[in-house]
Amino acid sequence: MNAPDQKDVEIVSQVRAILSGAGLRTTAARLAVYRRLQESDSPLTHAEVAENLVPLGFDKATIFRNLVDLVDAGLVRRTELGDHVWRFELRGVDEDHDEKHPHFVCTECGGVTCLHETDLSKLSQKSLDSIGQITEILLKGHCKSCETK
């Protein structure tokens, strides 16, 4: 068996500190769930997280409980993008608890992409403010992969 990579040891140490700082125990399952979300560049469903972690010996119920615990602790955001499926993604370290960003959902394959860098112009923000409080911005269409099929 190979010794763990120094970078991996540092990352796990950082995750342990984050979990402890949020008042959570640092169980193997919780570390694995957090790390899986950390490795993703888009929100993941419970099924997608489980797909990677069940073969490692974690059961689906434990994975789900840990996702909910991470949401309750404010470390993870849970979103529903119009398809009645919860998706989970890490919150940024300096991110406001209520801060949200737009998502793009491919209507063909169901893939979800975070649009962190998308910013509303001051003019559009002003007209949106007159409507009310925006809680989610969702764009739908066909991703590049599905466009070429």
Image (spheres, grey):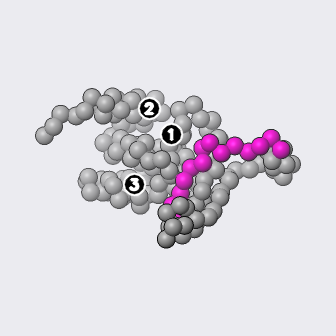
Q: Mark 3 and mark 1: span between their CA atoms?
A: 16 Å
Magenta highlight on residue 145: no
Q: Number of marks in the image?
A: 3
Q: Which residue is mark 3?
A: 49
User: Where residue 110 appears, x then y in whole percent?
Assistant: 52, 65
Q: Nearer the viewer, mark 3 or mark 1?
A: 3
Q: Mark 2 and mark 3: span between their CA atoms?
A: 20 Å
User: Residue type at mark 1?
Assistant: Leu
Q: Quadrant of the N terminus?
A: top left
Q: Residue at x 62, y 64 (%)?
A: 141
User: Residue type at mark 3?
Assistant: Val
Mark number displayed over residue 18: 2
Tell me: 88 left or right of 66: right
Mark number displayed over residue 39: none
Q: Earlier in the sequence, mark 3 or mark 1?
A: 3
Decide if residue 82 is in sight here.
no
Mark number displayed over residue 75: 1
Task: Please say if the residues under marks 2 and 3 sit with CB atoms less than 8 Å apart.
Answer: no
Decide if residue 14 is in sight here.
yes
Q: Which residues are drawn in magenta?
A: 110-123
How crowded pointer 3 is (Cα within 10 Å; few <14, some 14-19, many 20+) is rated as many
User: Residue type at mark 2?
Assistant: Ile
Tell me: 139 left or right of 14: right
Q: Residue at x 42, y 51 (%)?
A: 65
Q: Residue at x 74, y 50 (%)?
A: 134
